[in-house]
Amino acid sequence: MRRPLPSLTGLRAFEAFARAGSMTGAAAELNITHGAVSRQVRALETRLGARLVVGPRHDLRLTDAGRRLAAALGMAFDQIRAALPGAEAEHELVVSCLGTLAMKWLIPRLPAFLDRHPALRLRIIESHAPADFSQGGIHAAIRILGERPPEGVAAVPFMDHHHGPVLSPERWRACNGALAEVLKLPRLHSETFRPAWSEWARHAGVDLPPSVEDREFEHNSYMLVAATAGLGAAVAPWAFAAPDIEAGRLVAPFGFRRFDARYVLLHPARTQNGAVQALADWLREAGAQTPLPPPPLAVT
């Protein structure tokens, strides 16, 4: 039975535009002119009777119909590529990950995963924004999730999420083991999760007094460096702070509280991608092998 599909050339041009974000980027990838990409996308819109792209030429963006088609084409082309003879030897897996988690937890463990899959080319990109698979630029995303995933997205939990106050050993000694003294220190914050202190206090049953001083940093990694430098106390995830605690650069005198959210691997629900499945299996294993947070110190 004949499939009433549009031109494959037009579909490729549109998918490349959606992934690259510009006609110029798509043209460079497909080795054709900017004008040729534009004509193919317009022809596809005419064939479908729907607008896929709107906006001025220098700021084109996808319509809702365009986003749906781009997501479907990205999955379809990935599946075609995976089915090609020899594809296993050149397959690339692009994973979006929280920056500090990638730095402190994921990347130090990656040799074990890549040793199992030596033919896989793995690319890690940093983002803490909601995972968006509609553009086709990523195959999976690692996030902290406390609710159901978005429609059409599957979530594979692989590790619990614990938070707790951390500070330098020197700062802790100056506090003489007293929580009240720690709460008088400057409070360090990351822009990626501003309510960390209040959330920890709620889980720990602590009445959090107003801060004496707040110091804010763009990323958790910056915040942790500030804590090791003695700039104040921070509430940080165990997965982020563990290397500094194990090295003696930070202490966690009150231990860590388990949050409702978990670390998850997100991917399009209807995509069958062997590399994503392999990563999910390994993440579950690595999460299970990650040591639990240490117990609280003797505090007053």
Image (cartoon, rainbow, N blue to C red):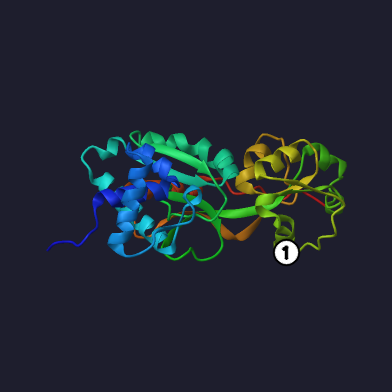
Q: How far across and down, in percent of the image, does residue 16 sit? A: 37, 46
Q: Percent x, y for residue 72?
A: 34, 57
Q: Position of residue 41 (x, y in %)?
A: 34, 52
Q: Please count the marks in the image.
A: 1
- According to the image, label 1 marks what residue? 202
Residue 231 horizontal/vertical position (percent): 80, 40
Position of residue 66 relative to residue 35, above or below, is below
Q: Report if residue 97 is visible in the image.
A: yes
Q: Residue at x 69, y 50 (%)?
A: 191
- In the rendered image, which quarter contains the N terminus? bottom left
Q: Nearer the viewer, residue 14 or 117?
A: 14
Foreground residue, 247 or 24? 24
141 or 155, nearer to the observer: 141
* Residue 200 falls in image quadrant: bottom right
Residue 32's place in the image compared with 259, above or below, is: above
Q: Residue at x 60, y 46 (%)?
A: 239
* Left or right placement of residue 278 versus residue 224 in this view: left
Element assignment for label 1: helix
Residue count near mark 1 (Cα–Cα under 10 Å), binned few <14, some 14–19, many ≥20: few
Q: Residue at x 67, y 54 (%)?
A: 193
- Looking at the rendered structure, the kind of residue marked 1 is Arg
- Report whether 300 appears left or right of 255: right
